[in-house]
Amino acid sequence: MSTIRKISSSALPTKYGQFIIHVYQDEKTGQEHVALVAGHVLSNENVLVRVHSECLTGDIFSSNRCDCGEQLVLAQSLIAEAGRGVLLYLKGHEGRGIGLANKIHAYALQDQGLDTVDANLHLGLPIDQRSYEAAADILRDLGVQSLQLMTNNPDKVSSLQEAGLVVTQRIPLLIQPNQDNVQYLLTKRDKLGHFIAEETGPDFGEL
């Protein structure tokens, strides 16, 4: 049974194009999630979708320690260019679900040599405790029947499929690495199984 409820909607003109913004509240967690919708997605198939986990440091402050902000910008621009799609912004996902303060604690441990996975474990926290149940419920509420999912994370694909959604294609969101996030990206590839090693992906050899 869905626990999400749409609480407000409005037109949202952006530098990338015109969107409708919907705010949903998850009555189970209290979190407010956002859906940016371009074009007509109700009862449509193969809708371009990005399920984006909130990242204050990357999305707002343009941190170089991750690729989150660049992925957000790329996804929004690709949806606007396609003229149809959904960008979900999921609150409560900071630091793969451990929260902002704990994420910054983990950053400090990474500065001492731990990777992102080992830093979480050192703090006694799960490697990844995100849930995509709300994302699936929001997509169903918007009338999305099947989707092309923009992600490098296999867990997002499997989670949405297990929730009953049809993912017809996974579209990579590949960002050029920098000196500050190359280890982060390699850890996501080697320990979390993210698909970031395709030929068209980041060139780690130049760093």
Image (cartoon, rainbow, N blue to C red):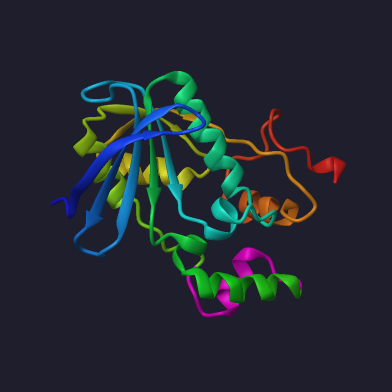
Q: Does 101 appear above or below 9?
A: below
Residue 166 lies in quadrant? top left
* Residue 125 highlighted magenta (yes or no): yes
Residue 100 located left or right of residue 4 = right
Q: Is residue 182 left or right of residue 67?
A: right
Q: Is residue 152 visible?
A: no
Towards the viewer: 200 or 80? 80
Residue 83: horizontal and vertical position, in percent?
41, 19
**Residue 189: x %, y % from top left:** 64, 48
Q: Is residue 144 among the parts visible in the rendering? A: yes
Q: Residue furthest right?
A: 206
Residue at 68% across, 56% down? 184
Q: Residue at x 45, y 19 (%)?
A: 82
x%, y% of residue 159? 36, 46
In the rendered image, residue 40, in percent from the top left (x then y), is placed at 28, 21
Does 17 lie within the magenta span? no
Residue at image location 47% in from the left, 69% down from the top: 98
Q: Which residues are magenta?
A: 113-126
Q: Residue at x 42, y 63 (%)?
A: 129
Instruction: Judge whether 176 appears above or below 77 on screen.
Output: below
